[in-house]
Amino acid sequence: DALEAFERLTGVDGAPDPDVISYNNLLTAYARTVLWQRAVDLLGGMLNSHVRPDTIIYNSVINACARSGQWVQAQDLYREMLNSRLKADSATYSTLINGYTRGAKWEMALEVGEQVKRKMSASIGNKGDDSSEDRRIRGSTSNTREDGSIAANRLNAVVYTALINAASRGKQWQRAVEVLGTMVELALRIDSITYSSLLSACGNNVEQAKVVCDRMDSLGMRRDTSTYNALIGVYAKSHQWGDAMDLFEQMKNKAVRLNIF
């Protein structure tokens, strides 16, 4: 298999030593195929070969564990990563949140969100105290700083949307609303995926769903396939089949792409 081929290659005389990129390519494949133990073993092989893993490597292994529902292992890897003095990024946090969500550990997922909020608040407070080295890393032009800010905004929005999804899975509507409030407070980009997750958190509460839709309408946000699917789900769970079918017809009339199952 891929791991055996990789190991054979590293044992060939004259073959180049595997680098971080080589390891990450294989780890990404393991994450996609949910081979979490292989990913953990490969990380151990990296350390034994004195190849220092970076944040991306740890994210890949954490992702492999999270996708397999191995949230305890994912949590241990996160701690190991921090002990190695590597900095967690938005991909780390969103992956952890998804792992906790799969393991039905809603409170742990929401605690990760609090860590992100504290980190972002500290970052905002320190913007005026950047060192010359920080400025050099980010780039010297205002356009570069602006592009980096937009990218960070989008990544952090992904983290908070994952949190709303966690609250949704845990049937914690109020917590989902609180997370949305945090996104507004931090001026994060809120899109239809975020609102779809919030609608899913409504369960069978149609009145709550209407509040979410009113919020979307007030912002001029167009309902897309994911939004309609979530909204139809709310009406279906409340056994309001007629209203659910009306929404389905509304999708067709507005030329919203329909899912094909």
Image (cartoon, rainbow, N blue to C red):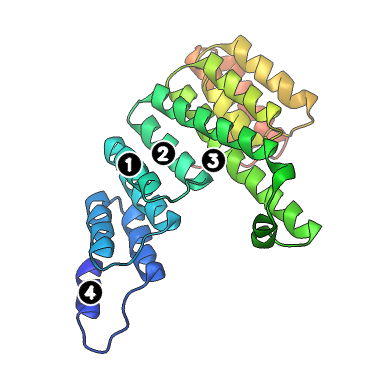
Circle 1: residue type: Ala
- Tell whether label 3 touches label 4 (CB within 8 Å): no
Give the CA separation, mark 4 to mark 3: 40 Å
N-term-proximal mark, 4 vs 3 = 4
Quick one: SS at disc 1? helix
Whether residue 52 sits left or right of residue 179 in the image: it is left
User: Which mark lies nearer to you, 3 or 2?
Assistant: 2
In the rendered image, which residue does mark 1 sit on?
A: 74
- List the single residue furthest toward the bottom: 14
Quadrant (top left/top right/bottom left/bottom right) for the N terminus: bottom left
- Tell whether label 2 touches label 1 (CB within 8 Å): yes
Q: Position of residue 108 (x, y in %)?
A: 40, 26
Seen in the picture, residue 179 relative to 68 is either above or below; the reply is above
Q: Position of residue 255 (x, y in %)?
A: 70, 40
Instruction: Count up the numbered dots.
Output: 4
Q: Which mark is residue 259?
A: 3
Q: Quadrant of residue 92?
A: top left
Q: Residue at x 54, y 34 (%)?
A: 116
N-term-proximal mark, 3 vs 1 = 1
- Tell whether label 1 touches label 3 (CB within 8 Å): no
Q: Which mark is residue 96?
A: 2
- Tell whether label 2 touches label 3 (CB within 8 Å): no
Crowding around mark 1 (Cα neighbors within 10 Å: few <14, some 14 to 19, many 20+) is many
Crowding around mark 4 (Cα neighbors within 10 Å: few <14, some 14 to 19, many 20+) is few
Give the CA separation, mark 4 to mark 1: 26 Å
Q: Nearer the viewer, residue 124 or 60?
A: 124
Circle 4: residue type: Ala
